[in-house]
Amino acid sequence: MLSKCLAIAFLAIAPMTDAAAQTATNQAASTTSATTHKEGEWRASKLAGVDVYNEANEKIGNIHDVILDRSGKVANVILGVGGVLGLGEHYVAVSFDKLKWVDQPVTSTTASTTSAPANAPATTSAPDSTTRTTTGAATTTTTTTTTSASTRWYPDHAVYNATKDELKAMPEFKY
């Protein structure tokens, strides 16, 4: 009789342990998450504030917000045009795929060069706020530090083919 009770108890418990093992395995498989940043992924929080330029390298606004659809895809980007310090800004919705994303800084179209006579003393400012004078030809060294977009998690700027006036003429996006 005792063996029958043990057999029934064993048969009753066996399916429960098998179900628990399957549930634990399914939960582990469904809760996998990303552990590192992948190339081509951007942080939405960093896209807000990114400057937007037109094809002529004129700043026409900046990204104010990013709108997602229910599936998590970016539906629209809200651009802020005009205004000062957020006051009087005109918000327009632009399709995400209409923006061209650029990782390099905007190139300036103006260049200025100044040269001093070769025999004139050159004056340089030292880090300790003192002025030093050198004789002879002075050379200037410029160091540019670049950060790749993969470490920043956002592009440098966006390009949209419109003028500021054309964006202001678009219907305003209402929150």
Image (cartoon, rainbow, N blue to C red):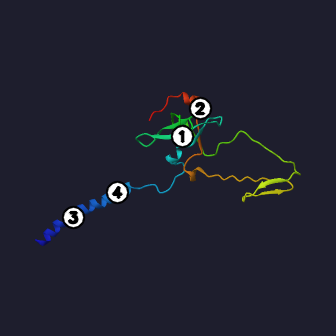
Mark positioned earlier in the residue sequence (3 or 4):
3
- Residue 31 is tagged as none
Residue type for callout 2: Lys
- Which residue is labeled 3 in the image? 13
For residue 63, which numbered disc appears in the image?
1
x, y (%) of residue 13? 21, 64
Give the percent coordinates (x, y) of residue 22: 31, 59
Towards the viewer: 126 or 43:
126
Q: Quadrant of residue 163?
A: top right
Between marks 3 and 2 in the image, the one whose residue lies nearer the viewer? 2
Residue pictured at 82% horizontal, 56% vertical: 133
Q: Is residue 22 left or right of residue 103?
A: left
Above or below, 174 against 28 in this view is: above
Alpha carbon separation for disc pair 3 and 2: 72 Å
Q: Position of residue 45 (x, y in %)?
A: 50, 47
Quarter of the image with the N terminus is bottom left
Q: Nearer the viewer, residue 122 or 109?
A: 122
Q: Which residue occupies 80% across, 45% down?
A: 114
The outermost residue toward the left is: 1
State the separation of the CA atoms marked 3 and 4: 21 Å
Q: Earlier in the sequence, mark 1 or mark 2?
A: 1
Q: Secondary structure at mark 1?
A: strand
Q: Amino acid at mark 1?
A: Ile
Amino acid marked by disc 3: Ile
Nearer mark to the viewer, of 4 and 1: 1
* Numbered disc 4: secondary structure: helix
- Mark 4 crowd level (few <14, some 14–19, many ≥20, 10 Å Cα): few
Q: Nearer the viewer, mark 3 or mark 1?
A: 1
Comparing labels 3 and 4, the label whose residue is closer to the camera: 4
Cα distance between the residues tagged 2 and 4: 51 Å
The residue pinned by badge 4 equals 27
